[in-house]
Image: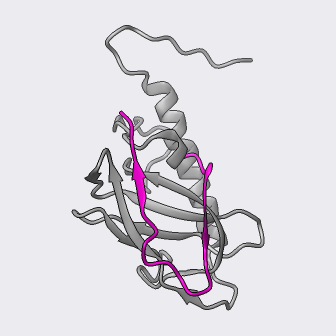
Amino acid sequence: MTAMCYHVPGKAMYHSRAISVTAFTIFASLLLNLAGCGGKSAVPVEGAVTLNDRPLADATVVFAPTTVEGPGPFFGTTDAAGKYALGTKEEPGTGAVAGEYMVMITTVKTDPNANEDTPVNQQREIVPGAYRDGSTRVTVPKEGNTAANFDMTGR
């Protein structure tokens, strides 16, 4: 059975966006359950996020491991200048472990107390798909990276 969506000109298609937000939330929740560094030392990872040459404030930046055994995930939230520093949910800003990661950036905020009866959040995602679907990859070197910048264009 295939899900059906229809588009009314001049109206947004919230159904597909709702599915994307839900999928991102589920994926991030699963990664939270796997969180931890496995005893490896964290190195500084920070940078800036821009969209169309403007700082992107209040965005969530996630570096998720590319393998099941990989460390992480690591998270950061951008400030008004678009700057972020990675860390764990328990220890924000403490860095990340060197390795390969999928990058996911989102501006949509989810309600951790929501359930299936809660109305779908109607926030509009402004981050281009390549930066929110995990297809953007990054390597954190053993010395860290204090210029892990993401200069996005679109919308």
User: Is 117 placed left or right of 2 in the picture?
Assistant: left
Helix, strand or loop for the magenta stretch, by majority: loop
Residue 46 image-quadrant placement? bottom left
**Left or right: residue 69 compared with residue 78:** right
**Stretch in magenta:** 132-155
Task: Give the image quarter of residue 57.
Answer: bottom left
Q: Residue at x 48, y 34 (%)?
A: 18
Q: Is 142 contained in the magenta span?
A: yes
Quadrant for the C terminus, please: top left
Asked if the stretch drawn in magenta spans residue 143, the answer is yes
Between residue 64 and residue 137, name the one nearer to us: 137
* Residue 69 visible, this orientation: yes
Answer above or below: position of 24 versus 58. above
* Applied colour scheme: one colour
**Residue 126 percent coordinates (x, y):** 36, 40
Q: Position of residue 111 (x, y in %)?
A: 40, 52
Q: How many marks are shown on the rendered structure? A: 0
Q: Quadrant of residue 70 in the image?
A: bottom right
Residue 88 lies left or right of residue 123; in this view the side is right
Residue 111 visible in the shown view: no
Q: Position of residue 20 (x, y in %)?
A: 53, 38
Give the residue furthest to the top. 9
Percent coordinates x, y for residue 151 in the rendering:
40, 53
Quadrant in the picture for the N terminus: top right
- At a point 62% along the width and 48% down the height, the residue shown is 135
Q: Among all residues in the image, which is located at the extreme left?
A: 80
Check the image and report above or below for 141 versus 148: below
